[in-house]
Amino acid sequence: MRMHLWPHIMLLGLCLLFATHSAQDYDNSDSTPAIPAQDTCIGVFLTYTFIERAKEFPHVKNASAQAYAFKAQVTVLNTMSENLKAWKIFIGFQHNEILVNTDGAALMDGLEFPAHVGNGTMISGYPMSDLMNAIDTAGDLNQIQAKIDIKGTQFGVKPPGSPMPKTIKLVNNGFRCPVPTKKGSQMYVCCVKDPKFKNKDANATKFLPRQKADLTIAYDVLQSYENNYLAQVTIDNWSPLGRLDNWNLTWEWMRGEFIYSMRGAYTLKRDSASCIYGQAASYYTTFDFSPVMSCEKKPIIVDLPPERAKDKDIGKLPFCCKNGMLLPSQMNETLSKAIFQLQVYKMPPDLNRTILYPPQKWKIEGELNPTYMCGPPIRVSPMEFPDPSGLMSDTIAVASWQIGCNITHPTKRKSRCCVSFSAYYNDSVLPCNTCACGCSDAMACDPDAQPLLLPSEALLLPFENRTKTALAWAKLKHRDAPNPLPCSDNCGVRINWHILSNYRHGWSARITLFNWKDYTFKDWFTAVQLSPNAFLGYENVYSFNGTKLNTTNDTLFLQGLEGLNYLLPETDGKNPKIDPRVPGKQQSVISFTKKNTPDIKIARGDGFPVKVFFDGVECALPDEIPQGHAVRISAGLLRLLIVGAEGNVWVTAY
């Protein structure tokens, strides 16, 4: 009888077991958040979790100098009802961290690994740059959350202390983040939408709006096939003072791609060996790699020379082939843009027409030009091109990305040009600051000493030939010469600003450009930012073309006249055996009127520039201005007073 009931009992047990599992709440599954605050966040939830560390070699007694290899993980979770596009976060590292890997993200400042990020860094998602919302994905964490595994080195925090960053925050426009919560080895914060933020893009689509930057780079896919695609790169210079000469463009392929051919530009190294001995040959087994343009992971791309512009194989593209010159549009609109095309072959698992990834870590630089910091590529609406057949229609790109690059301000000893000051009322020249453009060898000189005053003729001497003249001038002026002597400014381009005259109805200045480099600057320009009093009185410039910048109300834009637009390199003296080398030189007088500024104080600083630029580079200025009639004022105070001019705070003359 009991044996007869066993099948019924077992069936009942299975039903109860099934019912128990079916009745479980979905929210209590393994996807339950580990941090309770995550449940109440309606925005973007960020976490930073310190995982582990190990002491590195060398082992030292000084605890602050001991290096530790560490691992950490960052998560970015979209808890909104809408998608998060092109996420980017700031991590406030503070222990001299050196990152060696960020799996799941890319460094936004384009630094190469190992990357020194002790003052913090911004990272952006790669390859997962957009995070979907939970509603459209049924809460799929793989689509709404990004995980970034961080490996690196940090210093100075001994176990059991937790070497945590200062902060972590989302830096996308329209979000605000409170101070993060720290608990042991974990930090988290919920960043929410700012209700005061107004999105200027009224026609919002699934793509982000195009960025505004000093220089933008467009990466447009024009044709797409299963294993390769044709892309076009467009570089636009938007800055009124930015420029590039002989530009070099670099990026990093993240998914094994290689460049088969190019038009409008070329790579400095034509390398197929990396493909033959690498991953590419294992998939493209019958492929002829001999004509491949570049298999480098980090190719260096340069512009074609003008004589190849009409080449049917590698030229014949608009805006190409200018030897890498990008000028401000106000100088030459045609020369403010560059275009080239490349055929890119992909690798598994990206063998699909719609699987497209742009390269990362973009960098662009030129010859004595501004330093540009480029962000990551962001997906934008596909570019529209005029139909090549001439019909009244547009051809739309398969996919488009945009990279924004902005000019960075040079820090101390990081400039590439410098300025000296002089005036008719003082027979000494205040030369460029010591190590204004860096100090490569400070063993036999003092990198922190003030530069020695000079007679005006010494500006034509190379620094290594100035010592005798500078010491004699110091003795004549009863000034002590330090021992060791100051180091050179190490600048290839030096500019002298000289107050030439000051009379009842006006005044004048002379600007002189010295080129100490073995390089000719073609179509050079310089820009001078003046005090409001000086700028209002600008009258004329005589040996240069001079214009007031439309985008500012305090800057003069100066460039060479036609036929004189070359700043030549330094040359040998008349007798090279005994005469020092001579710099290339350009010079002009600038006149000003006092009609609208009768109270201008030339000797008190109004006559000296606040900033000076050469070919887009901000030059280093002296720390002081020349003395006159017992007047002595630091150039730093002068610039501070200029900035505060809106409050009408001015120093009166003696």
Image (cartoon, helix red, strand yellow):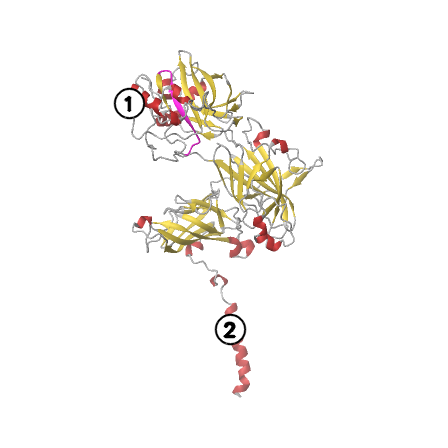
Instruction: Please state, as top left, top right, bottom left or bottom right, where the C terminus lies in the image.
Output: top left
Whole-percent x, y for residue 120 in the image: 41, 44
Q: Residue furthest bottom?
A: 1
Number of numbered markers = 2
**272 with respect to 537 (left or right):** right
Q: Which residue is mark 2?
A: 17
Left or right, 426 with respect to 549, comes to: left
Residue 367 as seen in the image, left or right of residue 498: right
Mark 1 vs mark 2: give the one in front.
Answer: 1
Residue 37 at x, y = what percent? Answer: 42, 54
Q: For this view, does 260 lie left or right of residue 114? A: right
Question: In the depicted view, which residue is nearer to us: 21 or 70?
Answer: 70
Furthest residue in direction front, as rendered: 577
Dot 2 falls on a residue whose secondary structure is helix
Foreground residue among 569 and 408: 569
- Magenta stretch: give its range: 414-425
Residue of label 1: 479
Q: Residue shown at 39%/29% (left/top)? A: 489
The amino acid type, in three-letter code, at marker 1 is Arg
Q: Is residue 609 visible?
A: yes
- Where does residue 562 sit, x and y in percent of width and height? 56, 20
Q: Amino acid at mark 2?
A: Leu
Image quadrant where residue 509 sits: top left
Which quarter of the picture shows residue 203? top right
Residue 420 magenta-highlighted = yes
Would residue 144 be counted in the magenta stretch? no
Q: Is residue 369 above or below residue 131?
A: above
Mark 2, Cα crowd under 10 Å, few <14 / some 14-19 / many 20+, is few
Q: Is residue 453 visible?
A: no
- Against 179, residue 29 (above or below) is below
| Image location of residue 136, percent across then percent down | 56, 54
In the image, farthest residue toward the top: 504
